[in-house]
C-alpha cells in the first residue's frame, strides 16, 4: 500500500524518477490495469451506496416525486429559451411535454410494483453492484476525461501510434503502464456529486490527469515534452479535422440535394 | 505432441502484455493445438459464467411480457389512443409494429435473456474459432508478404493468446455488468504483440500486418452491401 501511495504522490508531483521506475517494472501493464480498475471502483463508491440505499428503501413514489421536481425545474429553465414561440403554441408544447412525462412516470411506477422472482431488495443490490463493477469498463465522452479502461486503452492506442511516428521508443506495456498514472488525480471525482463544485473538481482532475499523461508519454517514449504533447494532441486534432471534413461533406451533399429540387 | 505450454500463469501474462508469454507459445511444438484449446476454453467458459449472470439478472426484473402489458395499458389511457382505436386498420398496424418492436428491442437494449445466454455456450466458442482462424490466416498472409518469418501454426498459436482479454467477459456472472468495447481494443493490442512475436518484424510492419486484415473485412462488407443493394434494386425495378 505504501508503494502505491509513493507512486501516486510521485505521479501527482510529476516526479520523473517515479515515472521511470514505474515504467521499468516487469508487471507495469498489470499495475496500470489495477490502478485504473481500483480508482474507478473507488470513484464509483458513492453511487453504489446511493443506489443501494435507494433500492433498499424501494420507495418508488419518492423517486418519482424527485424526478418530477427535477423535470419541472428543467422545464422552468427551458421556458426563457422559448420566448420566440407564440404563447398559445408554447403552452400547447409544454402541456404535451408534461403529459408525456406524467405517462412515463406512471409507467415507471407501475413497473416498479410488478413482481420479480428475487425479492426486490436483492434485485436492487445486484443492480447497484453490476452498475458499480461496470464503472472501470466505461468509455470517456472526451479523451482522458475519465479514469476508465476505455479511456486509457481507447485513446492510448492512437497516442502510442503518434508517439512512435514522432520517434518514440516505448514498448506497449511500458507506454500503457506509465500512462495509467493519469488516473491518479481522477480520485478527486469521488466528490463529483458535490453540489456547485462537482463540475469544477472534475475539470481539475481532467487537466491534472492530462498533464500527467503528457509527462508519462514523454518518459516512457523517451521524447521531449513538446513532442509528447504533440503525440497526445495529434489523435484529437486528426479526429477534429476528420469531423470537420465529414460535416462539410454532409453539408455539401445536402446543399446539392436542396439546389437540385 | 509434446509438453503442454499453456497454463493459467502464461494466459495471465499474455493478457497483461508480457512478451515472453507469446514467445513461449510460439516456441511450442504445436502452437496451433494449444491455441485451439485456449480459444474453445475461453469461449465456453466465459459463456457459462455469463449465463449465471443472465439468470440472476432475469430473476431480478419483472417479466418482459408484464412490462409490455403495463405500457400497452398506459397507452390506452392517452388522448391520442381514441384516434387510433377509431380506425381498425390503424389499430392493427400499430399493434403489429408494437409486437415486432417488443420482439427486437428488449434484446437490442440488453434485457436479460437466459435463452440467448444458453445459446452462447455454443455460439461464443464457434464465433471465437471462426474469428481466430480468419484473422489469423489473413494476418499470417500479410505478415509473410511484409517479410515475416513465422510459420502459420506459430501465427495461430500466438494470435490465440490475443483472445485472453475476452476472459474479462467471464465477469458477466455479475448481473447487470456492462463491459463495452474496451475488450476489442485490448485484443487488438494483444494481436500486435502476437504478430511481433511470431514474425519478428519491425514495429511498423507488424502494425500493418495487424490492421490490414480489418481492411479486408471492411472491403468484404462493402462488397456484401453493394451486392445486396444491387439485388434489392433489381427486385424493386422489376
Image (tube, coloured by chain):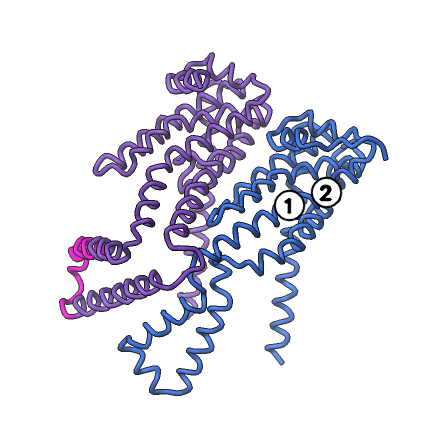
Q: Mark 1 points at which residue?
A: B45
Q: Residue at x 78, y 32 (%)?
A: B4
Question: Seen in the image, is A57 located left or right of residue A82?
Answer: right
Segment tinted magenta in the rendering: A71-88
Considering only vertical position in the picture, is A133 above or below A184?
below
* Magenta run includes residue A74: yes
Name the residue at the front extreme: A119
Local secondary structure at mark 1: helix
* Magenta run includes residue B77: no
Quadrant, the N terminus of chain A: top left
Which chain is the one coloured blue? B
Considering only vertical position in the picture, is A249 above or below B91?
above
Q: In which quarter of the image is residue B93?
A: bottom left
Chain A's colour is purple
Local secondary structure at mark 2: helix
Q: Which mark is residue B136?
A: 2
Considering only vertical position in the picture, is A124 above or below B79?
above
Question: Seen in the image, is A71 located left or right of residue B152?
Answer: left
Which chain letter goes with mark 2? Answer: B
Which chain letter goes with mark 1? Answer: B
Q: In which quarter of the image is residue A84?
A: bottom left
Question: Seen in the image, is A67 located left or right of residue B192?
Answer: left
Considering only vertical position in the picture, is B150 above or below B77?
above
Amino acid at each position: 500500500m505504501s508503494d502505491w501511495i509513493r507512486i501516486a504522490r510521485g505521479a501527482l508531483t510529476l516526479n520523473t524518477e517515479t515515472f521511470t521506475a514505474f515504467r521499468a517494472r516487469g508487471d507495469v501493464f498489470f499495475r496500470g490495469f489495477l490502478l485504473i480498475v481500483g480508482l474507478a471502483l473507488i470513484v464509483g463508491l458513492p453511487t453504489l451506496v446511493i443506489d443501494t440505499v435507494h433500492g433498499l428503501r424501494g420507495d418508488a413514489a419518492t423517486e418519482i416525486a424527485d424526478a418530477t421536481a427535477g423535470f419541472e425545474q428543467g422545464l422552468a429553465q427551458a421556458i426563457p429559451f422559448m420566448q420566440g414561440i407564440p404563447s398559445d403554441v408554447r403552452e400547447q408544447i409544454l402541456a404535451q411535454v408534461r403529459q408525456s412525462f406524467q405517462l412515463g412516470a406512471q409507467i415507471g411506477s407501475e413497473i416498479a410494483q410488478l413482481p420479480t422472482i428475487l425479492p426486490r431488495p436483492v434485485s436492487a443490490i445486484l443492480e447497484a453492484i453490476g452498475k458499480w463493477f461496470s464503472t472501470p469498463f466505461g468509455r470517456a465522452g472526451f479523451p482522458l476525461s475519465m479514469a476508465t479502461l476505455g479511456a486509457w486503452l481507447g485513446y492510448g492506442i492512437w497516442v502510442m501510434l503518434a508517439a512512435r511516428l514522432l520517434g518514440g521508443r516505448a514498448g506497449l506495456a511500458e507506454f500503457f503502464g506509465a500512462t495509467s498514472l493519469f488516473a491518479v488525480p481522477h480520485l478527486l471525482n469521488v466528490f463529483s456529486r458535490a453540489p456547485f463544485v462537482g463540475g469544477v473538481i472534475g475539470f481539475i482532475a481532467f487537466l491534472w490527469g492530462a498533464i500527467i499523461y503528457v509527462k508519462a508519454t514523454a518518459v516512457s517514449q523517451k521524447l521531449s515534452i513538446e513532442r509528447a504533447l504533440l503525440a497526445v494532441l495529434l489523435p484529437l486534432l486528426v479526429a477534429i479535422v476528420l469531423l470537420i471534413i465529414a460535416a462539410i461533406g454532409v453539408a455539401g451533399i445536402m446543399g446539392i440535394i436542396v439546389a437540385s429540387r | 505432441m509434446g509438453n503442454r505450454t499453456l497454463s493459467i500463469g502464461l494466459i495471465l501474462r499474455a493478457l497483461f502484455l508480457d512478451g515472453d508469454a507469446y514467445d513461449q507459445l510460439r516456441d511450442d511444438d504445436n502452437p496451433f493445438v494449444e491455441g485451439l484449446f485456449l480459444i474453445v476454453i475461453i469461449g465456453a467458459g466465459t459463456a457459462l459464467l455469463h449465463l449465471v449472470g443472465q439468470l440472476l439478472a432475469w430473476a431480478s426484473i419483472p417479466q418482459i411480457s408484464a412490462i409490455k402489458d403495463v405500457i400497452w395499458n398506459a397507452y390506452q389511457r392517452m388522448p391520442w389512443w381514441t384516434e387510433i382505436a377509431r380506425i381498425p386498420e390503424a389499430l392493427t398496424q400499430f399493434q403489429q409494429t408494437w409486437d415486432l418492436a417488443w420482439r427486437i428491442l428488449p434484446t437490442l437494449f440488453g434485457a436479460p435473456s437466459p435463452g440467448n445466454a444458453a445459446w452462447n455456450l455454443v455460439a461464443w466458442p464457434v464465433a471465437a474459432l471462426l474469428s481466430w482462424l480468419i484473422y489469423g490466416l489473413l494476418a499470417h498472409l500479410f505478415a509473410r508478404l511484409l517479410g515475416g518469418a513465422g510459420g502459420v501454426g506459430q501465427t495461430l498459436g500466438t494470435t490465440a493468446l490475443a483472445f485472453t482479454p475476452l476472459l474479462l467477459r467471464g465477469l458477466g456472472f455479475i448481473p447487470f455488468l456492462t463491459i463495452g468495447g474496451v475488450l476489442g481494443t485490448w485484443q487488438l493490442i494483444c494481436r500486435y504483440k502476437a504478430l511481433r512475436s511470431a514474425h519478428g518484424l519491425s514495429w511498423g510492419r507488424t502494425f500493418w500486418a495487424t490492421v490490414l486484415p480489418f481492411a479486408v473485412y471492411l472491403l468484404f462488407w462493402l462488397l456484401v452491401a453493394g451486392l445486396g443493394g444491387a439485388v434489392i434494386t433489381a427486385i424493386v425495378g422489376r
